[in-house]
Every structure is written in structure tokens, then in C-alpha cells.
Amino acid sequence: MSGPAQQSAPTAQRPAGPQRRVTSLDVVRGLMLCVSVAVNSLLLTPAWFDHAEWAGVNGLDLVFPVFVALTGCGLGFAMHRRTDVRSLARRVLVLVAVGLLYNALVSGSWEWATWRFTGVLQLYAGVVVVIALAHLLTRTARGWFLITVLLAAAHTAVLAAYATTCPGEELTRECNPSGAVDVALFTAPHVYWQGAAGHDPEGLLAILGACVSAAAGACLGHLLLTARARGDSPRQAAGPALVLVAALAAVAWLSGTVPDLAAGVDVPAMKRLWTAPFALAVAAGTGLALLGGHVLLDSARTPTALRRAIWPLEALGRNSLLVYFGSHVLMALLVHDVDGAGRTLAQRIAAAVAVGGHEQVSFTVLMLAAWTALAAVLHHRRIYLRP
């Protein structure tokens, strides 16, 4: 599901030595993970908050894209000097393999005939590959801004061109390139079942859209690294970073309006196809949050009391991959365990820990406390699960 300041594949390892990290990235990821764990703990998701069925954006549509944008920033930090292609290939293979296992656990089915080949971890692996290899082309903020624009333009062009073949030149669940490509490549039983084989929000087309968010994050990461290399303070870095955020927002608007003006085709902001207007808007908002944290937390003058207060969030952020996907797997297992009365294990636990009859609130607090405690122990021992 999705994380997530170096990011690499699921292998527990200890850092070779102390590094000067950008604390704000870990803390913002920690905040995102608090939201993610809380959302995963919902015993019943309100319709207004659940994933949009097709066009539009609901609250739940934002969690994983924010994770992807932060991942792009983390990869920018991790690969600003070198890209280990051999290690990258191994990590991606692990992500894909774990993704297939994750799909089986979440669906509760191990039937090969219907085993879903695409998924969140596979999408994540695709993003890591593209962003990592693109670092062989450029390691500058300007270069990454160009890559972001080119990816957004390519994704939008594909959608707009395909829309001209659809009834009314409108992308729908039944007529879109995601359905055409993913179903043709993987066959219908192996793609996102809720799309009824008509679209896959975690397939190949979605990877291209997710790369737009990640590339924008990498651009911001390189911008902050450049400012730090110059010896600029976080406040001095704020000006150029704000310009970048504004530019991302502008490109988001243009990517939604230019195709419409040129060909009469509408490419709306939506998560299902991870369109460029959506991807860039999410990246701009995430960048703004990260910039605020950078100014507040990465200064030499940041109060010690504040650093101690945000330590649990930093611990969550350091193990973002484990917490993000682990919380999804855990909740899937709790939901699939149903007793004779039709109550899931999650509901039974919620009833057992309820304080004052507030089952949902008590269960959410329990989940947040458990994952924060685990992340804190791992962070204290310097053990991290890296993407």
C-alpha cells in the first residue's frame, strides 16, 4: 500500500557511520505514517473519505502519493553522488517478490489463476528503478525539474491521445490506456480486481504517473542538498524552494489545461490514472510541508526540547517502508479473520480495548502506539528496513 532519508529494498541493515541527515524529511514521513496507520485502522471507511471510484480525489487517495513524493526526495538525498546498479537490481527484485506475497496476504487467496501481478509494492519498485537510473543522467535540481516536466508531458500526452479513441473523447473506467496495456500484458484475472479489468491504479501507466510525483520530490531533494553544500541556512534555502513549489503547482495546472485547449480532451486530476495534474499538485503540497519542516527542524538553532519531542516521528520516518506496508499487511490479516458471528479480529480487538465505549478511537490509538513503539526500538538500535 503507500512510504517511503535513504530509501532502498527490504533488508535490515545498520548504517556504516554517522551521517548528517535532513531531519525534516524523516519527521514529515513520520507524520504521514501516523495518518496512514490511523487510516488503516478504520473499521469502516466513510464513503466520502474512501478512494474515489474514478475521477476526482478523496482523502484516502492522497496517502500513498505523498509517500511516493517523499520517497523521491529521499532517493535524491541517497543518490546525489552515485547509483549502485547491481544493488538496485537486487532490491527491486526483492520488492517485486514481496509485493506478490503482499497481494496474496491482502486478498486472502493463493490461487495462481487469480493472483494479482500488479500492486503497490510493484509500483513502488518501478518508481525506485526509474528515479535511481535517472540519477545516471543528472544530479542537479534543474535537471530533475526538466525530468519532472518531461514525465508529466509524456503521461498527459498518452492519456490525451488515448482519450481521442474513446466515446465522447472522455477517459472512463472502460476506456483508458491502463486497461488496454495492463490487461493485454498481464491478462484480466491478474490485475486490480476493483477495476473490473477496466483500469489498474497500480499498473504500468500508474507507475509513469507516480514517477512524476517522485521526480518532483527528487528535484526538491537536490535543491535542498545544493543549498546545504553552499552553506545556506534552511531559511536561505526557503526562497528557491518556494519558487520550485510554485513552479510545480503551475505545471500541474498547465498539464490539465493545455491538452484540453489543444485537442478538446480533458485530463482531470485523479488518482486512478495518477494523472499529472494530480501527481504534481500532491508533490507541491508535500514540498510545502517538507519546506516548513526544514526551516523549523534543520536549523542549528532548533531547540533541544523540540528535537526530543519530534524523536518518535523521526523514528517512524526512519522505518517508513516497514511501518507503511507492515500496517497494511497487519490490518489485512485482522480483517480476514472472521468469527462465527461475522465479526473480524480487528473488531473483536477494538471491542476489547475500548475505553468509554469508543471502539474506533481506542483501536486507532492502540495501532499508533504499537507501530510507534516498534519504530522507536528499531531506531534506538539503528536497525532500518530500507527500500
Image: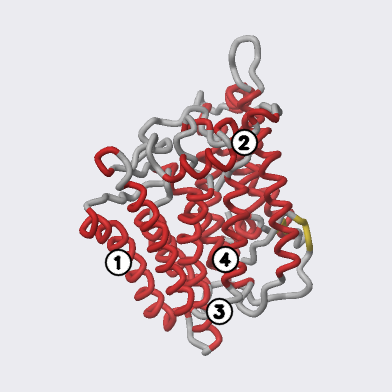
Residue 230 position (above or below residue 39): below
Q: Is residue 53 visible?
A: no
Amino acid on which disc 3 is placed:
Arg
- Taking depth in this image into account, of 282 and 84 the one nearest to the observer is 84
Q: Secondary structure at mark 4?
A: helix
How far is disc 1 from disc 2 in space, using C-alphas? 37 Å
Amino acid on which disc 4 is placed:
Ile
- Taking depth in this image into account, of 374 and 247 the one nearest to the observer is 247
Residue 169 position (above or below residue 339): below
Task: Tell me the tag on residue 139.
Answer: 3
Question: Residue 64, how many percent across, how many down?
Answer: 51, 49
1 or 2: tag closer to the N-terminus: 2
Q: Which residue, given by chain and number where applicable, does mark 2 sit on? A: 116
Q: Which residue, given by chain and number where applicable, does mark 1 sit on? A: 250
How far is disc 1 from disc 3 in space, using C-alphas? 23 Å
Amino acid on which disc 2 is placed:
Arg
Q: Which residue, given by chain and number where applicable, does mark 4 sit on? A: 131
Q: Secondary structure at mark 2?
A: loop
Category of crowding for the residue at label 3, using alpha-carbon neighbours closer than 10 angstroms: few (below 14), some (14–19), many (at least 20): many
Residue occupying the point 37% across, 47% down: 270
